[in-house]
Image: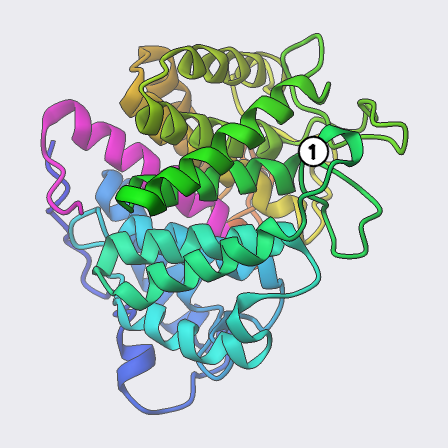
Amino acid sequence: MTLVSISLATAVTLGSFLQAGEPLPATSTLHSQTIENQHVADADTGERVRIAAGALMLHYDKATGLWDNKGWWNGANALTTLAMATKVSHSGVDPQVFRNTFVKAQLRFPGFLNEFYDDEGWWALGWIEAYDATADASYLTAAKRIFTDMTGGWDEICGGGIWWKKDRHYKNAIANELFLAVAARLGLHTKGAERTKYRSWALREWRWFQASGMINQDDLINDGLTSACRNNARNTWSYNQGVILGGLASLSQLTGDKSMLKTALTIADAATTHLVDKDGILHDKTEPHCSPDAVQFKGIFVRNLLPLELSSPKQRTTQFVQTNADAIWKTARTPANGFACSWNGPPNEDGPGASSSALDAFVVSALLTAHQDGSIAKTR
């Protein structure tokens, strides 16, 4: 299968949002006039990516560089999945969206720095992905500066690790997983002394995280640590099982240590065993009631399966992704191409976070399919 055949009579041109020089129409108007015309009975993986990317961009606010002017960290994840979507031929993603967000979003938080270290990590990963999609060095420079700020969150309380917020009251999994992932990715994007620095930070983080107790007896990662530096037994969110996979895949590539892939596969297998229903569909415990944060989680998990699968292929991973992508397309999608946070439906319009999460699944499905048959058309 190739990913280049798109036969939609009416298509959203994402770049038109940025190039026309006109304010965006109201979402509801665009939704009824444009996306509904894209509804088709079935679609190959490339068409799914194009349609979901178009649906996500209907929520884009050109003036702020964010999606519906909500969800700072959610915006970073929307940016990330759109950047990954550029690897799918004819995805319809215009790189101008990255430049617009780079300029406009900083009006809210200059340098993409705020009080949350995990927010900073999401933006760093987003700009690394945008750099991979465009070769615009300013994006990679931004990611490096963000990471430098993140290092200020490290101290020796609980033996190491970074804090969730700059008020230093909680050490949790996601901030530290992101710290690992950003360090490892930057190591792969640099040479010499810079690479050595990022490699050192990534290894330091992984050694601490592995010994922290946040990985429980089921090989799942709980939310964080208590004030006594013990696993707090809070929810095992899907995204906490995901970011670590991408981080370890990158760190394994950076160091040549294959044992990290074995650990990542163990966590991935635990998640796809314990966090799924009888049909193999991924869920978080709060569904179908998803908070503005939780609506984003599952897409992040699936996104991070991609580097792990490319590093250590397992047919069951590809099948898991395809099963979930098919469920989203067939049971969680409205006639107007809105997406529900619950991937086995019923169909609902749950906003940009749900669209971004669905797009993650479609992009990874497309890229794994393309990897299998050698038809990936655009990668950097």
Residue 350 visible within the image? no
Q: Given the image, on which type of amino acid does mark 1 rest?
A: Gly
Instruction: Provide residue 123's location: percent of width, then percent of height.
Output: 50, 57
What colour scheme was applied to this rendering of the protein?
A: rainbow
- The residue lying toward the viewer, choosing from 238 and 230, is 230
Q: Is residue 359 magenta?
A: yes
Q: Judge by depth and name the residue closer to the eye, 156 or 209.
A: 156
Image height check: is 168 above or below 217? below
On the picture, is 356 further left or further right than 21?
right
Instruction: State the residue at coordinates (11%, 47%).
Output: 5
Assess whether residue 270 is covered by the magenta stretch.
no
Is the residue 85 above or below the residue 95 in the image? Answer: above
Q: Quadrant of residue 10?
A: bottom left
Question: How many numbered circles are shown?
Answer: 1
Q: Is residue 87 left or right of residue 321?
A: left
Q: Main secondary structure of the magenta part?
A: helix
Q: Which residues are magenta?
A: 355-380
The residue tagged 1 is 160
Q: Secondary structure at mark 1?
A: loop
Q: Which quadrant, please, contains the N terminus? A: top left
Farthest-out residue, front: 193
Horizontal and vertical percent for residue 198? 42, 41
Residue 94 appears at what percent x and percent y?
25, 67
Could you say where residue 224 lies in the image, as x and y percent from the top left? 75, 32
Residue at the spot x=80%, y=28% of the render? 234
Q: Judge by depth and name the residue closer to the eye, 356 or 66.
A: 66
Residue 229 in the figure: left or right of residue 87:
right
